[in-house]
Structures are given as C-alpha cells and as structure tokens.
Amino acid sequence: MPVFYECQRCTACCRWPGQVRVTEVEIRRLAEFLGLDEFTFIQRYCRLAADRRGLVLEEKPDGSCVFLEGRDCRVQPVKPQQCRDFPNWWRFPGFEAQCRARPRPLDAETYLRAVAEATGRSLEEVKQRFSDPARAR
C-alpha cells in the first residue's frame, strides 16, 4: 500500500543544505507575490546555480531558505515546485530522521489524488509518474 506523507510544516526541509531551483514562471509568481519586478527579485533573492544551469534561491548565512521566517514560509502560497514536491514527489534515503511529515498508508487512487493536491500537479501527471513501478515509492 502506498504511503503519503502529510507535511507538518516543521520547516526541517527549509533548513537543509542544498539548492532550490526556480523557473522563470516561479520567479514571476514570487516577484509578483512580494510586490517586486522580476529584475529586483532576482537581484535580491537569487544566484546562479552551482552547475551554472539556472537560478537558485539564496540562503541565509545559517544555510536556511531566504524565505523562512521563524517557523513559517514567507511565500507559502507561491512557493517553488521543488518545495511543494517534497517528500511525496522526491525524497532522499533517511529523510524521515529529520522530516516530521506523517506517513499515512492509502489505497492507490487516494494516494495519487493526495500527491496531486500536495504538489499542485495534475492527477494525470501524477498517474503517469507513478505508473512506472521503478519510480513508484
């Protein structure tokens, strides 16, 4: 039976080292949400990715996300897809030791609908992703 992880908004994933990539569409959405033009948003909140293949969000000196404020995401309604996707679309071995998301076994159809809702993806996209047994979790 598939397991869906319910985010508890513990912010552990917002504090992990790593890069949060942002697309042009996400930059536009984030800038608009913050009342900035795209150029100002990029100058203030982005940097070139280490692999030089796009932009990533800046981090605070402690390594946490630039949009983490206490225990809240300043851009929650428009946060990047990479953030919305964790831990139901992608995850890494041992993530459970740090992430407080609650595992909830679900039947296959309910699981697919829950992943679609949590990630903001279409049900068809989720079904396509998880129809390949090698990629299903």
Image: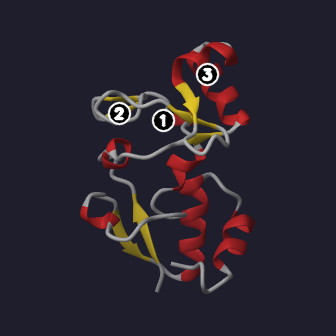
Instruction: Say few, some or many: other residues with alpha carbon within 10 Å of mark 1 (under 14 / 14 to 19 / 20 or more).
Output: few
Report which quarter residue 94 is drawn in: bottom left
Q: Residue furthest front?
A: 51
Question: What SS does tag 3 mark?
Answer: helix
Q: Quick check: 59 left or right of 129?
A: left
Q: In the displayed structure, would residue 39 be above or below residue 23?
A: above
Q: Which residue is mark 3?
A: 42
Disc sitting over residue 39 in the figure: none
Rendered residue at 74%/67% (across/down): 124
Q: Nearer the viewer, mark 3 or mark 2?
A: 3
Q: Amino acid at mark 3?
A: Ile
First in sequence, mark 3 or 1: give its number: 3
Rendered residue at 58%/57% (across/down): 117
Q: Amino acid at mark 2?
A: Asp
Residues 25 and 72: in front is 25
Marks 1 and 2: in contact by CB < 8 Å?
yes
Q: Amino acid at mark 1?
A: Gln
Question: What SS does tag 2 mark?
Answer: strand
Measured Cα–Cα span from mark 2 to mark 1: 8 Å
Measured Cα–Cα span from mark 3 to mark 1: 18 Å
Q: Whole-percent x and y of residue 24?
A: 72, 34
Measured Cα–Cα span from mark 3 to mark 2: 22 Å
Question: What SS does tag 1 mark?
Answer: helix
Q: Which residue is mark 2?
A: 72
Q: Which residue is mark 1?
A: 76
First in sequence, mark 3 or 2: give its number: 3
Report which quarter residue 28 is drawn in: top right
Instruction: Say few, some or many: other residues with alpha carbon within 10 Å of mark 3 (under 14 / 14 to 19 / 20 or more).
Output: many
